[in-house]
Amino acid sequence: MLGKLFLDHPRSVNESYLEHAAFAGRFSLALFAAGCAALVHALLPFCFERTASKAVARLYARTHNRGH
């Protein structure tokens, strides 16, 4: 039961638990960086004009249709 909870989703995208954890960890760091850039941009609109949107587009491209 516990193994099923931890392993079903990683297997659905053809990864081991550790491979999936590493991917998700890198993904979360990229999202955090994009969020920080967006926050700076909100206060200083001349900074990071396209940083967050480019990061989101890159992340979407990496995850779109994973496991299909």
Image (cartoon, helix red, strand yellow):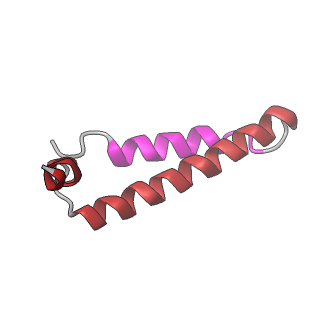
For the residue pair 30 and 1, the one nearer the viewer reads as 1
Magenta stretch: give its range: 48-63
Q: Position of residue 33 (x, y in %)?
A: 64, 51
Q: In the visual, does 1 lie left or right of 15?
A: left
Q: Residue at x 78, y 38 (%)?
A: 41
Q: Main secondary structure of the magenta part?
A: helix
Q: Is residue 43 magenta?
A: no
Residue 23 % position (x, y): 37, 59
Of residues 8 and 61, the one nearer the viewer is: 8
User: Residue 51 location, x and y as percent?
Assistant: 66, 45
Q: Position of residue 39 (x, y in %)?
A: 75, 38
Quadrant location of the C terminus in the rendered image: top left
The residue that appears at 52% across and 40% down in the rendered structure is 56
The residue shown at (41%, 40%) is 60
Q: Is residue 57 magenta?
A: yes
Say left or right for 54 vs 11.
right
